[in-house]
């Protein structure tokens, strides 16, 4: 029989929060691009996102769950990691909400591009903070390899967001 502890459930929920926050947006396809919508110059085909994001979510889950279950780490440090994971998930959810497809304009407005850019820049800044947090603890330096692909992808998303905001687009 499974011996499921409340702490295990909390660690799973916190670790899965980046995925759980994005799930409704993905399931409902609210962040889609229509064929006639302008796309960023460097925007890859839509299927690339369907490959990359699950891998990033799996890597983030492994990192967070491993840290939260690491007996060598203090509870206060684990609480910081849990808090930061939830904040980052919240920022990602805010970006997804801002950048959702707008039926009224059959795409996105200039304000959506602007505020989406601001949110992506906040994610970048928060990512630098998270990298620093992982580097400062000798027990978590190795987990940086799980976080860096996500951070690189957020950098790429920021470039795409900037291209969209500045009108550097293609059909």
Image (spheres, rainbow, N blue to C red):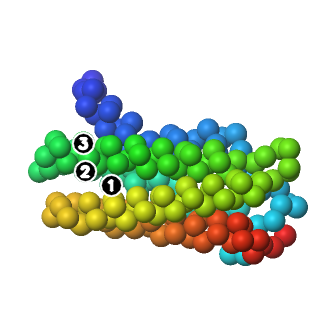
Q: Which residue is mark 2?
A: 67
Instruction: Examine the rendered structure and indicate whether residue 120 appears above or below residue 95.
Output: below
Give percent across and percent down for residue 157: 59, 65
Give percent across and percent down for residue 91: 50, 49
Instruction: Examine the rendered structure and indicate whether residue 82 appears above or below residue 128.
Output: above
Q: Which mark is residue 63?
A: 1
Q: Residue at x 22, y 45 (%)?
A: 78
Instruction: Tell me how far mark 3 sits from mark 1, CA to CA.
Output: 14 Å
Which element is circle 3 on? helix
Instruction: Examine the rendered structure and indicate whether residue 24 appears above or below residue 89.
Output: above
Which element is circle 2 on? helix
Instruction: Give neighbour class at mark 2: few <14, some 14-19, many 20+ (Cα, 10 Å).
Output: many
Instruction: Give neighbour class at mark 3: few <14, some 14-19, many 20+ (Cα, 10 Å).
Output: few
Q: Which mark is residue 79?
A: 3
Q: Are marks 3 and 1 in contact (CB under 8 Å)?
A: no
Q: Are marks 1 and 2 in contact (CB under 8 Å)?
A: yes
Q: Left or right: where does residue 82 sit relative to residue 124?
A: left
Give percent across and percent down for residue 42: 68, 75
Q: Residue at x 26, y 60 (%)?
A: 133
Q: Quadrant of the N terminus?
A: top left
Which element is circle 1 on? helix
Q: Is residue 36 among what the camera can see? A: yes
Q: Left or right: where does residue 133 sit relative to residue 32?
A: left
N-term mark: 3 or 1 = 1
Q: Residue at x 58, y 67 (%)?
A: 158
Q: Which dot, 3 or 1, sits closer to the camera? A: 3
Quadrant in the rendering for residue 171: bottom right
Q: Is residue 43 among what the camera can see? A: no
């Amino acid at each position: 029989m499974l011996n499921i502890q409340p702490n295990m459930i909390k660690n799973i929920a916190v670790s899965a929060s980046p995925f759980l926050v994005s799930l409704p947006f993905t399931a409902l396809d609210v962040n889609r691009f229509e064929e006639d919508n302008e796309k960023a110059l460097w925007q890859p085909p839509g299927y690339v996102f369907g490959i990359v994001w699950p891998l990033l979510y799996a890597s983030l889950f492994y990192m967070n769950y491993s840290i939260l279950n690491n007996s060598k780490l203090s509870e206060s440090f684990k609480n910081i990691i849990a808090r930061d994971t939830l904040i980052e998930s919240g920022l990602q959810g805010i970006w997804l909400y801002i950048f959702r497809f707008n039926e009224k304009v059959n795409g996105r407005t200039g304000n959506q591009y602007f505020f989406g850019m601001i949110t992506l820049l906040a994610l970048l800044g928060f990512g630098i903070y998270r990298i620093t947090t992982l580097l400062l603890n000798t027990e978590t330096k190795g987990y940086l390899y799980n976080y860096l692909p996500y951070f690189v992808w957020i950098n790429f998303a920021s470039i795409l967001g900037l291209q969209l905001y500045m009108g550097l687009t293609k059909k």
